[in-house]
Image (cartoon, grey):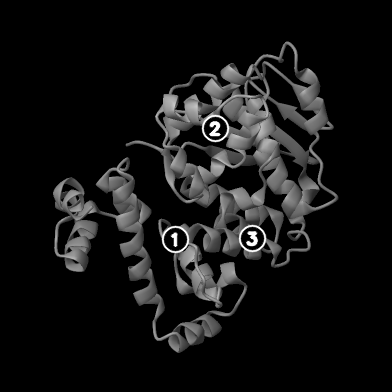
Amino acid sequence: MASYIRAASLGGFEELVRSYDVNPIEILKDIGILPSLLRDPDAFIHYDHYLSLLEKAAFVCQEECFGLKLGALQNISTIGLIGVYMSRQLSILEALKVAQKYVYLHAEGIVFQVTRYNAQTCRLNFVRLNDYNIDMPQKSQLAICLVSNILKDLIGPPWYAEKICLKQRAPQHSAHVFKEHFPCEVEFEKDEDALYFPAAFLTLKPYNFNEDLVDQLILQRLEMQSSTKADDQPLLIESSIRMLMATGDCSIENIALCLGIHPKKLQRTLKQQGTSYRDLLENVRKKEALRMIDAGNISLTDIALQLGYTELSIFSRNFKNWFGYPANEWKNKVRSHLE
């Protein structure tokens, strides 16, 4: 089964490439990624294409630390509502558990684990960054930098890493870039891509979380949809459902947790809007099904999983009930006639 990653992972890509006087559109097209996909942070990009893009951009821009520089432009908002969900947890440990459980919603090709290295230190290491056991230095750089920035957002001023380990060789001409981004020991040609940090951070409560991140995500969604609605909360509820529905935990309780309100208040809000959580979930699934089919690069099985269905047959049956056609027929024939 193919793996995908949200287009949000390429946030800052075009600007960074242009800073080297290189046309990012040409690189995207050469890899086979539609530039328009980068306009929608929730669009899916084939993970292999994503990996190839990072390495290609590093080569064309002649920048050994391209992934690191791109990661430096990203933070907890890059992972969308997963980041909000993490920030609502009672401790950094619980936040990392959320990330481990749901990171596949952002990038199916990334798996990481957090373990105790010793009594004072924890290790966060990436188990798999690609399916072919091939060194991808740009992706490793980006992943380490993004995770460090996310932890910085969650922990606040006390945050620091004790050591960074990378499988790649030390850059020939840009080793200083690592020192600028990571004010700690950086070791190359190691057996792992990993980040070491004080174990004491795990017991901390996410730092001084406020509504700025939520507001930013709302604004992104409003700009993307060119919405003129004055009431932003329905939009955020839909965004929360969209982010969590592929999990087994897309309940009204967890949606309320993302929004920072009590489930009963969410139920009252939906009732005032003349809808219910079940109806809203179905409407989001319908819109997302059409959006992903229209993208043309995602299999029906993968779409079913992203919509939270355990079996393709259940999705296919519901799709026919919604639109009057089987999903495969819509994909292959009906959509082309409607365009």
Cβ–Cβ below 8 Å for labels 3 and 1?
A: no
Residue 148 x/y as whole percent: 71, 41
Is 115 in front, or is 51? 51
**For the point 44% across and 34% down, which residue is it?**
47
Return the disc, 3 or 1, that comes first in the chain's sequence. 3
Helix, strand or loop under label 2? strand
Q: Spatial distance from mark 2 to mark 1, Cα to Cα?
A: 27 Å
Q: Are marks 2 and 1 in contact (CB under 8 Å)?
A: no
Residue 287: name its quadrant.
bottom left
Q: Position of residue 303 (x, y in %)?
A: 31, 50
Q: Quadrant of residue 274?
A: bottom left
| Vertical position of residue 19 compared to residue 231: above or below | above
In the rendered view, would you say 129 is above or below 159? above
Look at 48% across and 32% down and name the residue there: 50
Along the line of sight, which residue is nearer the eye, 173 or 2? Answer: 173
Residue at 30% x, 49% y: name it.
294
Q: State the residue position of label 2.
A: 127
Using the image as rendered, state which of residue 226 and residue 201 is in the foreground: 226
Find disc 1 in the rendering and name its residue. 242
Q: Is residue 339 left or right of residue 266?
A: left
Which badge, 2 or 1, comes first in the chain's sequence? 2
Between the residue at mark 2 and the residue at mark 3, the CA separation in whole angstroms equals 31 Å
Q: Which mark is residue 216?
A: 3
Residue 261: percent from the left, percent from the top?
60, 77
**Amino acid residing under circle 2:** Val
Which label lies toward us, 3 or 1? Answer: 3
User: What is the distance, in whole Å, between disc 3 and disc 1 at their CAs?
Assistant: 17 Å
